[in-house]
C-alpha cells in the first residue's frame, strides 16, 4: 500500500513541476512491473535551455535513493517549492532520464519496488 502512495506522490510532484513551467498536453504513464515501477511523462510547450536540461538531469540523479529514510521524505512531498519537490522526487526514484524528443519534453523515472 505504501508503495502505491509513494508512486502517487512522485506523479503529483512531477505534474506540479510541469504545470508550473506552463507545459501543455501532459501525458503520464505508470507501469508497474514485478521488480520496478516506471513513470513516464511527455509534455509540450515547455522550453528548457540545454543548460537547464542538463542541470535538471544532474540534479535528479545526484541524490541516491535512501530506502531507510524514504518514509520521512515522501511524507514531506508537496510542502516546499518546485526545486525542493523535485529534490524529494530524486530521493524516491532510482533513475531519472530527462530529454527532448522533437518538441516534447520526456521525463522517465524508474523506481525499484520495495513491496516485493
Image (cartoon, grey):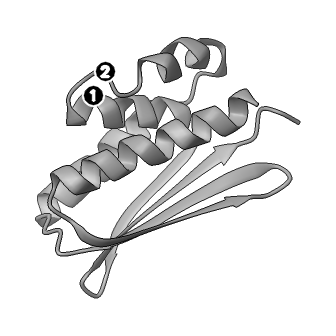
Q: Which mark is residue 105?
A: none
Could you tell me if the residues under marks 1 and 2 are in contact, i.e. CB atoms within 8 Å?
yes
Q: Horizontal and vertical percent for residue 47?
A: 13, 69
Question: Which quadrant holds residue 52?
Answer: bottom left
Residue positioned 70% across, 27% down in the render: 2
Judged by depth in the image, the label closer to the viewer, 1 or 2, is 2
Of 44 and 66, which appears nearest the observer?
44
Of 105 and 21, which appears nearest the observer?
21
Residue positioned 39% across, 36% down in the render: 62
Q: Where 32 falls versus 113 (above or below)? A: below
Q: Where 49 falls versus 21 (above or below)? A: below
Q: Which mark is residue 84?
A: 1
Q: Horizontal and vertical percent for residue 68?
A: 65, 13
Question: Which quadrant holds residue 77?
Answer: top left
Which class describes the residues within 10 Å of circle 2: few (<14), some (14-19), or many (20+)? Answer: few
Q: Horizontal and vertical percent for residue 105?
A: 30, 71
Give the left or right position of residue 88, taking residue 113 as reference: left
- The answer to which of marks 1 and 2 sits earlier in the sequence is 2
Question: Which quadrant holds residue 54?
Answer: bottom left
Q: Which mark is residue 79?
A: 2
Amino acid at each position: 500500500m505504501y508503495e502505491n502512495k509513494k508512486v502517487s506522490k512522485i506523479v503529483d510532484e512531477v505534474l506540479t513541476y510541469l504545470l508550473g513551467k506552463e507545459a501543455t498536453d501532459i501525458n503520464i504513464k505508470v507501469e508497474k512491473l514485478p521488480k520496478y515501477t516506471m513513470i513516464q511523462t511527455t509534455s509540450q510547450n515547455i522550453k528548457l535551455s540545454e543548460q537547464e536540461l542538463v542541470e535538471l538531469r544532474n540534479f535528479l540523479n545526484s541524490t541516491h535513493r535512501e530506502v531507510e529514510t524514504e518514509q520521512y521524505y515522501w511524507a514531506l512531498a508537496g510542502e516546499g517549492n518546485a526545486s525542493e519537490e523535485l529534490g524529494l522526487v530524486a530521493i524516491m526514484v532510482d533513475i531519472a532520464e530527462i530529454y527532448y524528443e522533437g518538441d516534447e519534453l520526456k521525463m522517465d523515472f524508474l523506481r525499484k519496488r520495495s513491496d516485493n
